[in-house]
Image: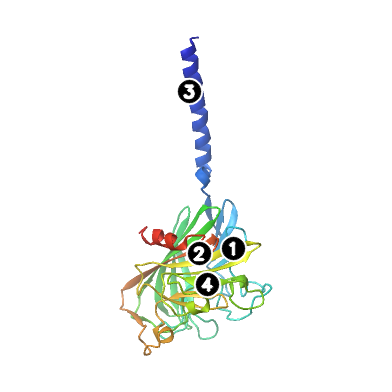
């Protein structure tokens, strides 16, 4: 066989082998460091895995919960980043306060006068109805907001998307559309709302195991971030000698962007565009949002769980990239 032909045959074999290898890599979702996300409905929750390891559960049917919540939320280094209480027994350093601060959620404290933020007798409930879609890394759920007598006041449709672009980051994107499907609806002027998370005790700025720090997009630090307007807020703390952060993004398309933050030094952080009388001392009702029957409004947020403090994780540029992505 001529040398040129032998050389050509060898190249063809190498190319074929390389193609098969790349096909196998891509088919397993591992090409160029990408991670495989999978969703599975299980016992009243949607289990979200990254490379077959738990990232979070969306718990939508739980007799003890008055709303759907994400629990637990596992960070990129494997630590649980939200507190256990009230979903489980409190871990070391966790305060058994505010039983309505259940990991990660969306709700509000005053909807046509009904409190959906707190739990207990006379409070409202957000009741899961159906899944409208279920894709590889996202799903859309339909919920009804009902008062203590079971009357529906409001409908929400939420698209929840999950991302794990590398070993340093995990993200949950929330796009929630609120619709006045029955009557006019007023979201009242209160600090008790709305897109919230109660972090693991390490993120606290004070307390038994507190190691946390806080910063917002305007450069305000520590507990002074409470009640301030900002495009994003970050909390971070050392976990086994590596810093881990939670950054929450408010999308520019949201009503009253940049939002106000109900961000406490004990680990509660909530984006709240409604609480003007508390945050700015405005007259009661200044922060109300009214939806006439048939009207709707959409809010978009990102929870980014990352290795490193906001500077090292380049949160400012990451926010700009996310905010321009559409």
Q: Nearer the viewer, residue 61 or 245?
A: 245
Q: Earlier in the sequence, mark 2 or mark 3?
A: 3
Q: Is residue 24 visible?
A: yes
Spot occupied by residue 252 in the image (x, y as percentages of width and height): 36, 67
Q: Secondary structure at mark 3?
A: helix
- Earlier residue among tags 1 and 2: 1
Query: Label 4's element?
Result: strand
Q: Which residue is mark 2?
A: 310
Identify residue for label 3: 12
Q: Nearer the viewer, mark 1 or mark 3?
A: 1
For marks 1 and 2, give the CA distance: 10 Å
Q: Which residue is mark 1?
A: 243
Mark 3 crowd level (few <14, some 14–19, many ≥20, 10 Å Cα): few
Report the Cα–Cα distance between label 2 and label 3.
49 Å
Residue 212 located left or right of residue 8: right
| Vertical placement of residue 15 versus 285, above or below | above
Kindly identify the residue that appears in the image at 58 percent across and 69 percent down.
82
User: How many other residues sit within 10 Å of disc 1, few (<14), some (14-19) or many (≥20)?
Assistant: some
Of badges 2 and 3, the one in the foreground is 2
Q: Which residue is mark 4?
A: 214
Mark 2 neighbour density, 10 Å: few (under 14) some (14–19) many (20 or more): many
Between residues 126 and 221, which one lies in front from this camera angle? 221
| Distance of label 1 from label 3 (alpha carbons) | 48 Å
The answer to which of marks 1 and 3 sits earlier in the sequence is: 3
Quarter-of-image position of residue 217: bottom left
Give the residue drawn at x 55%, y 78%.
265
Name the outermost residue toward the bottom: 283
Vertical order, 20 against 225 (above or below): above
Residue 84, x across and y down, in percent: 63, 71
> What's the CA distance linking mark 2 and mark 4?
9 Å
Mark nearer the N terminus (3 vs 4): 3
């Amino acid at each position: 066989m001529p040398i040129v032909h032998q050389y050509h045959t060898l190249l063809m074999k190498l190319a074929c082998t390389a193609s098969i290898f790349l096909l196998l890599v891509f088919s397993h979702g591992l090409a160029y460091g990408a991670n495989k996300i999978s969703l599975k409905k299980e016992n009243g929750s949607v289990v979200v895995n990254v490379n077959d390891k738990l990232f979070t559960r969306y718990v939508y049917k739980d007799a003890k919960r008055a709303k759907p919540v994400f629990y637990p939320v596992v960070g990129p280094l494997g630590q649980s980043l939200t507190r256990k209480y009230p979903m489980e027994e409190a871990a070391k350093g966790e305060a058994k306060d505010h039983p309505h601060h259940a990991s990660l959620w969306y709700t509000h404290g005053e909807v046509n006068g009904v409190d959906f933020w707190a739990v207990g007798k006379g409070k409202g409930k957000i009741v899961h109805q159906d899944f409208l879609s279920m894709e590889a890394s996202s799903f859309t759920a339909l919920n009804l907001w009902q008062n203590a007598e079971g009357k529906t006041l409001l409908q929400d449709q939420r698209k929840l998307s999950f991302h794990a672009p590398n070993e340093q980051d995990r993200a949950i994107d929330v796009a929630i559309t609120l619709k006045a499907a029955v009557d006019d609806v007023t979201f009242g002027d209160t600090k008790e709302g709305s897109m919230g998370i109660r972090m693991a005790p390490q993120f606290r700025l004070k307390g038994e195991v507190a190691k946390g720090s806080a910063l917002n997009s305007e450069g305000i630090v520590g507990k002074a971030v409470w009640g301030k307007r900002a495009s994003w807020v970050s909390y971070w703390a050392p976990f086994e000698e590596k810093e881990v952060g939670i950054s929450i993004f408010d999308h520019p398309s949201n009503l009253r962007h940049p939002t106000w933050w109900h961000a406490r030094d004990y680990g509660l952080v909530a984006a709240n565009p409604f609480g003007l009388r508390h945050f700015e001392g405005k007259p009661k009702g200044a922060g109300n949002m009214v939806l006439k029957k048939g009207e709707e409004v959409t809010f978009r947020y990102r929870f980014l769980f990352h290795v490193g403090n906001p500077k090292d994780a380049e949160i400012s540029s990451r926010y700009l990239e996310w905010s321009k992505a559409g």
